[in-house]
């Protein structure tokens, strides 16, 4: 299986090369040349397997230049009981009927771990498979969750180093502490004076700087990225939708072949696009419900066919969805409209911040997707209601999805079972959750963890327990213009 660019003009490459490179030469995103299909026999086999075995099988359908043994070993290490106590992607049924697919039992308590625990292993192997003798230097600009999950994933991985930049005042207390206390001999963390866009723009400038590449090359390094446009992050996310379906069949909740709906709290369109791929591979998914917060650019797009990022940007309590350019939507456009039209739409987006897809494209997309959004008020109400009604503590991102799923069901009367992606531990956003659930203020952002735990009788997950007493390893704050020097120093 080879990979090509969504924009049609880049070279065709192997999976290992696509993972090493991240972005295609022509600025497009890598997509597989064809989509593998799961047979009835495959489903029967998958239902009998562990999560790691399911992951190895599904990844193997895309990463044909990796052996079965390699993938199985990597998946068993990535999704071990030690990293994901109690299982990698458990389902929890709510009394009200929703099936919560909990993707946050990994080492950083957010769903990014599902991909970032396995992707570093795939990259290490990609270096060998492509004959690369330099060290990969991963650069990340983060608004919180991705930075920590990438640090934890790449920690102490041979022939890889990772530097993360985050906006000094743009991440939560918990997120800041999670990054500042990061362990590992190959990691660097810098707070920068500026906002997330400043960090992101300077990281992009470093990637585009030929002189910088030359200097790093002399030192034996090349730059690589860990963000969700990399195929190595997308492929592992297909697995848990298929795994959840098997678990529903095994528990007798559905029969093999029955349809389900899937609802995903969406930012960059990576997670929900993985669900779409699972559907295209043969998973019986009827509707893909795309849930947004008040940055509802996708809700409007799915309604009208016009994608318009020229709108106010809202800071919400679900910050990982505060995004106005959903990069992975480009992959859906490719599969729906082909590479020529995708390149045109992306050109218009770059020039005008806006594009409108042709009527046939919108129709084809709406065959699979429907979009709903939740305001801040609705999200808080859902956090409260779900705790009172179902005894379930959700995080704000997940609450956005629950709101969307309930709006969909109320509007359509569709009784198909809904699997909702639960993307972060409520304790990662304990201050907001405490406020919504108890209608009182916590004593402080860090104190909110213990207070939420005491008030609801729910244990703090292991990655967040005792966070305040861990040793701080990274205190440096730099100006954006010092970022290239920080990178070069780190490559010594
Ligand atoms: C990243 C993230 C999302 C959004 O996922 P996308 O793949 O970017 O759509 C949702 N919830 C949480 C908690 C996240 O960290």
Image: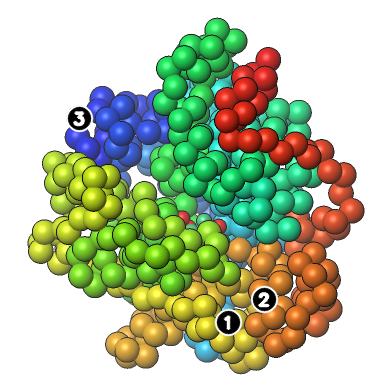
Query: Residue at horizontal 80%, vertical 82%?
Result: 455
Query: Residue at horizontal 87%, vertical 44%?
Result: 471
Ligand 1 is within 8 Å of the C-beta of the residue at disc 2: no
Above or below for 437 versus 84: below
Write down the residue under mark 2: 433
Residue 247 rendering spot, x and y as whole percentages: 51, 67
Write down the residue under mark 1: 380
| 202 or 326, nearer to the observer | 202
Mark 2 or 3: the one toward you: 2
Write down the residue under mark 3: 9
Q: Quadrant of the N terminus?
A: top left
| 473 or 58, nearer to the observer | 473
Residue 39 rendering spot, x and y as whole percentages: 31, 54
Mark 2 crowd level (few <14, some 14–19, many ≥20, 10 Å Cα): many
Mark 1 or 3: the one toward you: 1
Q: Secondary structure at mark 2?
A: helix
Tags 2 and 1 touching, CB below 8 Å: no
Query: Residue at horizontal 52%, vertical 78%?
Result: 376
Residue sitting at the far top: 218
Tags 1 and 3 touching, CB below 8 Å: no
Q: Earlier in the sequence, mark 1 or mark 3?
A: 3
Residue 379 rendering spot, x and y as whole percentages: 53, 79
């Amino acid at each position: 299986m080879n990979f090509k660019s969504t924009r049609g003009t880049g070279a065709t490459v192997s999976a290992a090369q696509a993972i090493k490179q991240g972005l295609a030469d022509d600025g497009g995103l890598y997509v597989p040349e064809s989509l593998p299909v799961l047979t009835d026999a495959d489903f029967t086999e998958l239902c009998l397997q562990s999560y790691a075995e399911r992951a190895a099988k599904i990844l193997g359908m895309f990463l044909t230049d990796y052996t079965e043994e390699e993938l199985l070993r990597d998946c068993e290490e990535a999704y071990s009981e030690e990293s994901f106590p109690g299982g990698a992607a458990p389902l929890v049924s709510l009394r009200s009927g929703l099936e919560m697919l909990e993707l946050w039992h990994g080492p950083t308590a957010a769903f990014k771990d599902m991909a970032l625990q396995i992707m570093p292993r795939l990259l290490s192997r990609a270096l060998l498979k492509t004959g690369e003798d330099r060290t990969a230097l991963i650069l990340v600009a983060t608004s919180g969750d991705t930075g920590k999950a990438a640090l934890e994933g790449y920690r102490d991985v041979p022939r890889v180093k990772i530097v993360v930049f985050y906006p000094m005042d743009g991440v939560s207390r918990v997120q800041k502490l999670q990054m500042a206390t990061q362990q590992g001999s190959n990691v660097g963390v810098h707070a920068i004076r500026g906002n997330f866009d400043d960090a992101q723009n300077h990281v992009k400038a470093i990637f585009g700087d030929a002189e910088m590449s030359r200097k790093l090359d002399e030192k034996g390094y090349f730059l690589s990225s860990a963000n969700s446009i990399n195929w190595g992050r997308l492929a592992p996310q297909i697995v848990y939708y298929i795994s959840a379906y098997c678990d529903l069949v095994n528990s007798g909740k559905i029969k093999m072949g029955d349809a389900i709906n899937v609802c995903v709290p969406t930012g960059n369109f990576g997670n929900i696009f993985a669900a779409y791929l699972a559907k295209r591979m043969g998973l019986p998914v009827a509707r893909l419900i795309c849930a947004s917060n008040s940055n509802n650019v996708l809700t409007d797009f799915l309604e009208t066919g016009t994608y318009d990022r020229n709108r106010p940007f809202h800071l919400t309590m679900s910050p990982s969805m505060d995004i106005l350019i959903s990069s992975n939507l480009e992959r859906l456009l490719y599969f729906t409209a082909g590479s020529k039209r995708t390149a045109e739409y992306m050109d218009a987006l770059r020039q005008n911040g806006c594009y409108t897809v042709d009527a046939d494209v919108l129709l084809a997309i709406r065959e699979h997707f429907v979009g709903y959004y939740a305001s801040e008020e609705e999200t808080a109400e859902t956090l409260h209601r779900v705790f009172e009604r179902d005894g379930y503590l959700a995080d704000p991102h997940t609450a956005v999805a629950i709101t969307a799923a309930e709006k969909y069901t109320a509007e359509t009367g569709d009784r198909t079972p809904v699997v909702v992606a639960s993307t972060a531990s409520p304790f990662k956003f304990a201050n907001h959750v405490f406020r919504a659930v108890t209608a009182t203020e916590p004593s402080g952002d860090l104190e909110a963890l213990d207070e939420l735990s005491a008030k609801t009788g729910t244990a703090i997950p292991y990655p967040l327990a005792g966070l305040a007493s861990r040793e701080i390893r990274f205190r440096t704050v730099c100006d954006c213009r010092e970022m290239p020097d920080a990178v070069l120093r780190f490559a010594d």
